[in-house]
Structures are given as structure tokens and as C-alpha cells.
Amino acid sequence: MLLDLAGVVYDGDTPIAGAVAAVERLRKAGLPLRFVSNTTRSPRHRIIAQLAALGVEVRDEELLTPARAALEWLRRHGRQPHLLVHPNLEAEFTGLDGGKSRAVVVGDAGEAFDYAGLNRAFRELVAGADFLALATNRSFKDADGQLSLDAGAFVAALEFACGRSPVVLGKPSPDFFLSALAGLNARRPTR
């Protein structure tokens, strides 16, 4: 069972009515669970703590985020990241060893998006770095309840500038969901 978080388990800091009980029922039924989130601002430990505060206990291996998918991709392909992500997320990428080639990793950097950062990423891309997008969302409901610009606009700008499309590692990429299923030893769905 794959469960999205925002809008399914919680809305901001409030659990969705019945969500905590539903997760408990799924666990009691013995169904293997994965919680999937497209957030590219919050590190895993913060998401797990947020869920615990809402009454939903989630183990580290049960949570799949685009950052985790990017780490797996970087390790599998032996790449060092050039990060254009939110400062809160940078620690998720520590400890990557080896890899002589580079990959630009773009997420929702929030206020850290600026011309200098975008231009550094662009220069890495035109020098041959791989291009990874944690998500291509247009907007999201921010903490103030208003829509805010998400990473998709910045990914699109870099895509236009360098003339290459990114590997999208978050939702709606089928590979994101297949990665969650692989962790459950589930069969790949057929069309």
C-alpha cells in the first residue's frame, strides 16, 4: 500500500480526519506500507517527526521522498551532486563517496533560488553534468495558506537554457512509484 502524505494523511500540521485510524487498520491487517511524499524542502527526519507528532509512526525505510530517490540514483550512477535545493535538504546528500562525474540536483530551494545559483547549475549542465529534478510541480500550498511557486518553473528554466530534459525522480514519475514498490518486493504492474 502506497500512501501519499500531504492531503491524504495530513494537511499542514493537522491530520486528515480518519487518517491515523486508517493507517493503524492497514498495519493491523498486515499490509506492507510505504509513505510517499513529493516534498523537496523537508529532510526525512523532520517528516518522520511530523508524522509521529500526528500519531503516525513511520520507520525510515517506509518513507520515500524525491531526495531519497536522488541519493539512490547518484549512488547507482556514481555521480557527485551539484545541489540547487532548499538549505534544509542539503544534509540529506552528505556522505556520497566517489563519483568523478557530476549531476545537478534541483528541488524547491525556496528563498535560496537566485540568479547566481541558477547560473552555477546551468554552467554545470552545459559542461556535461547529468540533470536531476526532484519534482516538477508548478506550485504548492505554503505555510501561509497561499500558493507559492514550486521547483517546476526553475527546472523548466534550466531545461530551456541547457536544451536537455531532466530525469524526474519524484511524483508523477513512474520510476518513483516503482522504487517504492521495489522496497515492498511487489511485482511491477502491467499495463
Image (cartoon, rainbow, N blue to C red):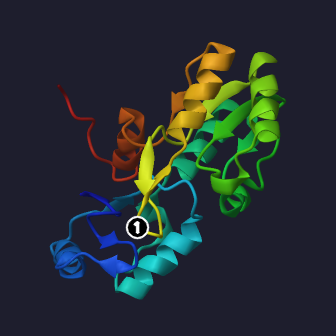
The quarter holding residue 156 reads top right
Q: Residue at x 49, y 41 (%)?
A: 135
For the residue pair 185 and 74, the one nearer the viewer reads as 74
Q: Residue 37, relative to residue 55: is it above or below?
A: above
Q: Residue at x 68, y 55 (%)?
A: 111
For the residue pair 159 and 52, the one nearer the viewer reads as 159
The quarter holding residue 134 reads top right
**Is 170 left or right of 74, judged from the image as shown?**
left
Q: Quadrant of the N terminus?
A: bottom left
**Is 113 left or right of 124, judged from the image as shown?**
left
Q: Residue at x 50, y 80 (%)?
A: 49
Q: Amino acid at mark 1?
A: Gly
**Is 153 left or right of 175, judged from the image as shown?**
right
Per the image, the residue denoted by label 1 is 145
Rendered location of residue 63, percent (x, y): 44, 62
Q: Residue 112, relative to residue 70: is it above or below?
A: below
Secondary structure at numbered mark 1: loop
Crowd around label 1: few <14 · some 14–19 · many ≥20 (10 Å): few
Total numbered badges shown on the rendered structure: 1
**Residue extending farthest top:** 163
Rendered location of residue 87, percent (x, y): 72, 59
Rendered location of residue 32, percent (x, y): 27, 63
For the residue pair 100 and 41, the one nearer the viewer reads as 41
Q: Residue at x 48, y 74 (%)?
A: 48
The quarter holding residue 191 reads top left
For the residue pair 38 and 23, the one nearer the viewer reads as 38
**Is 111 left or right of 19, judged from the image as shown?**
right
